[in-house]
């Protein structure tokens, strides 16, 4: 079972992706034009398609379409209470939709170690990077542990409130043990070595990274320009 | 290469964990440390890799340990780690990355190796250890055995002079042990120094130079290889050691005991995320029988018993008791599983409370009787997490018995156990069989299988071949 790593041909450099996230956020909060918003979502969906995430692209497309339909067709014709109740939620969801898209793209295509490497390149302090990476690695471990504990509960007669309590006792103990063992393994593998850390993977900007950034800068410019025109 | 000079150590001031240890290991030597659980094997490895004293609070160390010319107590851990590679017992908690490639490179990245050198080393590691199947994978999709192999490989990538291994085979099956044995032989040919603490000994006897036998924190004797393998079985058992010879799998093949209370698995087929794990599994187990399930790492043993317990849904086929097919929920009620890590299944705040939780209306006398038969009566008020490993395991079994489950499943009950403890577990399981439980034991411990099981089912990839006279 030799699977070529999907990360070998990462679509975007992690640094470009993080910058993209920042720029898209700027656009989202600066823009006031529906057309610009549509163009932005369309551009991001094409980025999804370019990355080979067809299914996610389609789901996002439908999701955004649904939000628009809600606001422009369903709410005006729906009972007032209903419309008032959901209008704010929908507006916000639509507003941050492009940010969620970029976030999803990052999670789907860029492995953790690339993001950490990007942070290192940007000289984020080591004190921030190590806890962050260990924490993120710890989530799946906890999920695995919870799975085991739930199995064990199914085979016992643990019911109701006792259930919530029952998850935590074993979880806390195993978390403490894991932390201790993980620590021992870390120090015997030289995590405290003061030598500057190197990386087996190299990051570099490629054409698509530059295109992405240039396009998103154009969006930023357009957002502000349209806004000035509107005032 | 390693000199331990008159060392005594204790974790707290109550008693000495190690007493007057003197040991000199030459460069290129392979030395085994053996002895019963709790004899100080792990502590010995921690003396050498520097976790003692650097990673141990409140410990008291006397004497001096010198490794590769460095005084361990006075050298920073990261300096020691450049010369000494350590592999630990628990494969679950040795990883810092989600991805196997990143994990292999982790140690080299820490010492600041150049990318060219790293790529070269990683390529060599994958080729020399033949672990192509572990490349580019998420660690969370790996079995315990695969994780242990990866842990060893990521140390190998750093190319240390000294390897310190603490029970590296606790989670490995026979086949993986065989691969591991070859890897160790290769290390030895390259002149590496190896210190290995182990319970399972048979795979080491070909190439160790000396064996250190410990008892209660003291070195009792040091054997040369020849003298060690010449130990008679009688002597070995007295020392509490596991077998020294590769265990041929003797097919205990007793016919089925009775035709009543039979667990029947018929045409069972399971899938995980659309990928078939096994197909067309058929067997019978009658009440009072102990049936072993063996097979390589990752073949689907755990999935099979999870399915029997109703924790995983079957794709096809049925599990029935007494000819009555059971739904998933019903199987949850009929089955109990003693898990590999029993920490996951103890929820109460005292031993007594733990039992009440599962007994659901049992009389006090009954709980007491069960606790007595598992030697737990004196720990009634102890918190389950404060019990020792073996006691926790017995408590987990006691809960299963109290909840009145018919079918008991044991998942790797002997991983990391010495001879005496293995016998104790075997005795307990036999006692349960006498109480007419239906018992399934998942294990790759052949020595244990031979001594406890009435019949064995061998799970191979995509089919279940069975040595099963009585059932067909």
Image (tube, coloured by chain):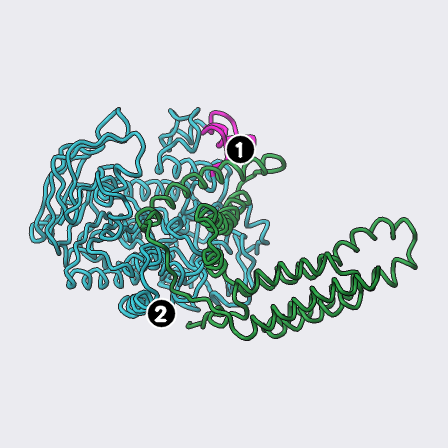
In depth, the one of B446 and B318 nearer the eye is: B446
Q: Which chain carries label 2?
A: B
Q: Position of residue B432 (x, y in %)?
A: 39, 41
Which part of the image, by quadrant, shows the C terminus of chain B?
bottom left
- In this rendering, is residue B57 above or below B3? above
| Chain represented in cyan | B
Q: Taking the image as drawn, is residue B255 in sight?
A: no
Q: Where is residue B394 in the image (x, y as percent from the top left)?
A: 39, 37
Looking at marks 2 and 1 on the same chain, the residue that comes earlier in the sequence is marked by 2
Q: What colour has chain A? A: green
User: Which element type, helix, strand or loop, lies under badge 1?
Assistant: helix
Looking at the image, residue B52 sits to the left or right of residue A127; the answer is left
Mark 2 vs mark 1, CA separation in Å: 47 Å
User: Which element type, helix, strand or loop, lies under badge 2?
Assistant: helix
Q: Are there few (<14), some (14-19), or many (20+) residues within 10 Å of tag 2?
A: some
Identify the residue position indicated by label 2 in the image. Answer: B132
Q: Tell me the magenta residue range.
A: B346-367
In depth, the one of B173 and B429 nearer the eye is: B173
Q: Nearer the viewer, mark 2 or mark 1?
A: 2
Looking at the image, residue B113 sits to the left or right of residue B319; the answer is left
Identify the residue position indicated by label 1 in the image. Answer: B357
């Amino acid at each position: 079972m030799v699977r070529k790593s999907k990360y070998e041909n990462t679509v975007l450099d992690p640094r470009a992706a993080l910058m993209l996230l920042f720029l898209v956020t700027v656009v989202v909060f600066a823009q006031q034009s529906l057309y610009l918003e549509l163009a932005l979502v369309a551009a991001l969906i094409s980025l999804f398609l370019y990355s080979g995430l067809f299914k996610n692209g389609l789901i996002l497309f439908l999701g955004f379409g649904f939000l628009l339909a809600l606001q422009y067709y369903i709410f005006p014709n729906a009972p007032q209470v209903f419309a008032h109740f959901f209008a704010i939620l929908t507006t916000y969801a639509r507003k941050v939709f492009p940010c969620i898209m970029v976030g999803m793209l990052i999670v789907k295509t860029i492995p953790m170690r690339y993001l950490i490497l990007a942070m290192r390149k940007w000289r984020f302090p080591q004190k921030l990077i190590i806890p962050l990476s260990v924490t993120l690695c710890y989530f799946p471990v906890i999920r695995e542990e919870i799975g085991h504990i739930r199995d064990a509960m199914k085979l016992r007669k643990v019911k109701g409130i006792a259930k919530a309590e029952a998850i935590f006792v074993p979880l806390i103990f195993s978390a403490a043990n894991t932390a201790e063992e993980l620590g021992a393994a870390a120090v015997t593998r030289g995590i405290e070595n003061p030598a500057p850390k190197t990386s087996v993977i190299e990051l570099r900007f490629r054409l698509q990274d530059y295109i992405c950034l240039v396009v998103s800068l154009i969006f930023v410019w357009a957002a502000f320009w349209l806004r000035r025109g509107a005032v | 290469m390693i000199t331990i000079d008159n060392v005594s150590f204790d974790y707290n001031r109550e008693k000495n964990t190690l007493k007057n240890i003197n040991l000199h290991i030459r460069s290129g030597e392979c030395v085994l440390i053996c002895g019963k659980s709790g004899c100080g094997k792990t502590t010995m490895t921690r003396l050498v890799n520097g976790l003692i004293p650097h990673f141990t609070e409140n410990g008291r160390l006397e004497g001096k340990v010198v490794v590769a010319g460095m005084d361990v107590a006075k050298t920073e851990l990261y300096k020691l780690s450049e010369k000494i590679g350590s592999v630990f017992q628990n494969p679950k908690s040795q990883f810092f990355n989600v991805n196997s490639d990143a994990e292999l490179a982790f140690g080299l990245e820490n010492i600041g190796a150049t990318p060219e050198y790293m790529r070269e080393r990683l390529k060599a590691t994958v080729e020399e250890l033949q672990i192509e199947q572990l490349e580019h994978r998420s660690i969370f999709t790996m079995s315990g055995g695969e994780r242990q192999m990866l842990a060893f490989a990521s140390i190998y990538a750093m190319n240390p002079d000294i390897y310190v291994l603490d029970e590296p085979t606790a989670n490995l099956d026979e086949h993986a042990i065989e691969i591991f044995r070859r890897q160790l032989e290769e290390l030895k040919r390259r002149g590496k120094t190896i210190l290995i603490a182990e319970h399972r000994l048979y795979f080491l006897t070909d190439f160790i130079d000396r064996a250190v036998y410990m008892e209660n924190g003291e070195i009792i004797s040091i054997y040369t290889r020849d003298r060690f393998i010449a130990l008679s079985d009688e002597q070995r058992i007295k020392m509490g050691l596991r077998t020294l010879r590769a265990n041929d799998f003797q097919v205990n093949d007793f016919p089925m005991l009775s035709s009543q209370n039979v667990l029947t698995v018929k045409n069972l087929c399971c899938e995980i995320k659309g990928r078939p794990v096994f197909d067309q599994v058929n067997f019978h187990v009658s009440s009072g029988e102990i049936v072993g399930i063996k097979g390589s790492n990752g073949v689907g043993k755990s999935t099979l018993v999870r399915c029997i317990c109703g924790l995983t849904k079957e794709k096809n086929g049925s599990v029935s008791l007494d000819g009555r097919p059971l739904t998933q929920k019903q199987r949850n009620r009929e089955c109990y599983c003693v898990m590999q890590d029993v920490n996951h299944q103890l929820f109460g705040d005292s031993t007594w409370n733990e039992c009440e939780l599962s007994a659901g209306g049992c009389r006090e006398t009954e709980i007491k009787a069960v606790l007595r038969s598992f030697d737990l009566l004196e720990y009634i008020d102890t918190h389950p997490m404060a019990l020792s490993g073996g006691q926790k395991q017995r408590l987990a079994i006691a809960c299963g018995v109290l909840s009145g489950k018919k079918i008991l499943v044991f998942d790797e009950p002997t991983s990391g156990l010495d001879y005496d403890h293995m016998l104790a577990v075997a005795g307990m399981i036999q006692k349960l069989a006498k109480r007419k439980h239906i018992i399934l034991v998942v294990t790759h411990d052949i020595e244990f299988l031979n001594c406890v099981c009435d019949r064995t089912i061998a799970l191979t990839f995509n089919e279940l071949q069975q040595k099963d006279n009585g059932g067909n």
